[in-house]
Image: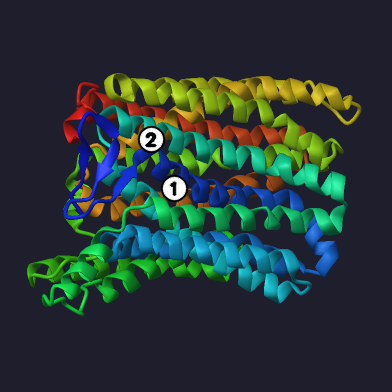
Amino acid sequence: MSTEPADDNDNVIRVPGTDRVFYRGRILVVLLSILAMTMMAISAINVALPSITESIGASNSDVQLMLSGYALAFGLVLVGAGRAGDVLGRSSVFLAGVALFTLASLVCATISEPQWMNAMRIVQGVGAGLATPQVNGMIVQYFHGQRRAWAFSLFGLVVSVSVAIAPLLTGLLINSLGPNIGWRASFLWNVPIGLLTIVLGARWLPFGPERKRRLAKRRGEFVPTRLDLDPLGMLLLSLIVLAVMLPFMLHSSSGFLLLLAVPLLSWAWIRWERSYATAGHDPMVNLKLFEIRSFTHSTIISGVQFLGATSIFVVIALHLQDGLGAAALAAGIVGLPNAVASAISSLWSGRHVITSGRTIVIWGFVCSIIGLVAAVAMSWLMDGDTPVLHYMWLSMPLILCGIGIGAINTCNQALSQEDIPANIGGTAGAVKQVAERIGTAVGNAMITAVLFSVLPISWTAGFTAAFGVIIVLQVVGLVLAIVDKRMLGDGRSLQNLA
């Protein structure tokens, strides 16, 4: 749907052929609401798991599925949902995803059997996978120049802060309401926010292709009933994502045999997408997307960054609670300064990404690496007799990590979309998110495996080894960021996309 700023107010969108007027600020409020909920659902459950296990009698395999089911369903649905939004209309797919996520959250808060919890976590993941690609697609479609950079700075802020603050909020709920009610409240908070998002989305979001099809029918024009969604392309890519993520999520030795199928599935998918495009169809992912260097470079950098950075607070939570005997709430508080620093960094980076985005990414990695090294040094000063308040000293180096991660996430999100046409914004954003979800799944499995393998020596040694792997991955990200800047520079202005 083509849109134009209204007169001299570039916060206003007019829909050609109608009298409807939409406001970019309102659109962003709706989009970021579901983004916050879906990101919080990733980390909030980590603190709630002990209470859930005791309350509904979940086994170890049930707990594993609660964690992996959401992430796996999220990753599987992403690209197909992005493609569906690009073709069918992003607003409709977005609201369908929000409704599904909200309904599943309500059921999660009320169930008493682990099987239902596992099923609803999968449904939650499907809802999240449907909605989040539309966030990226609508930002690319309706925001231009500095407004797009600002929108993506808020995008990065929401991702960084939501993941960091969710464990703290969950810990507060469990501490104040008790274990049985507290974990249920951590799911229940999604319901009023989701319902409000649906109501406001129906009023504030433009419905482009959907509106055009309705108007065409009223005028008696022919409206095609067959939409080219490339179902075989969707299936093959879903199998690739499944084969990569599932072994690392289930930690099964037999599951790693699935990795052997990845090269063959990838070859089949590439061949199909090429032949589908050659035959005159519209493939699910046009492979020319990967010829856009700004997108490909940023996607690879994000994948590597998520491979390490998303495990930071998993390792810290295990070290503080199991190693040093700290309470879950104390472990959550340690991450609070990190969330605040990440928020400030995201907002600042959004103001400067147009002129200095790739330079900011480089310094973001440097800042993160320094913080990680300092955190390792701090861990050697702690032992089982460390007073609880002294755990907060660990939050000091984590502030540096927050500054770096906030800058990297915000700038990479904007830079990855600088050359993406609006009509494939949802698909492009979904492909990038798949790389991030795969990085998270593989990184968590790999880094926790390193932690537990070194634990027989000591918790401090395990912490050091795990953070050592994270540092190495961040160094790889730094090298890639330097190469990216040398190849593309910082002079490519997002304003050219208006």
Q: Which residue is mark 2?
A: 151
Q: Quadrant of the N terminus?
A: bottom left
Q: Quadrant of the C terminus?
A: top left
174 lies left or right of 288: right
The residue shown at (38%, 54%) is 133
Secondary structure beneath label 2: helix
Q: Earlier in the sequence, mark 2 or mark 1?
A: 1
Residue 292 x, y percent position in the rendering: 19, 43
390 lies left or right of 344: right
Identify residue type, mark 2. Ala
Secondary structure beneath label 1: helix
Instruction: Please say whether residue 419 is visible from this viewpoint.
Output: no
Q: Which mark is residue 31?
A: 1
Corner quadrant of residue 371: top right
Corner quadrant of residue 455: top right
| Image colouring | rainbow
Q: Residues within 10 Å of mark 1 (few under 14, many from 20)?
A: many
497 lies left or right of 108: left
Q: Which mark is residue 455?
A: none
Tell me if label 2 and label 1 are in contact, CB under 8 Å: no
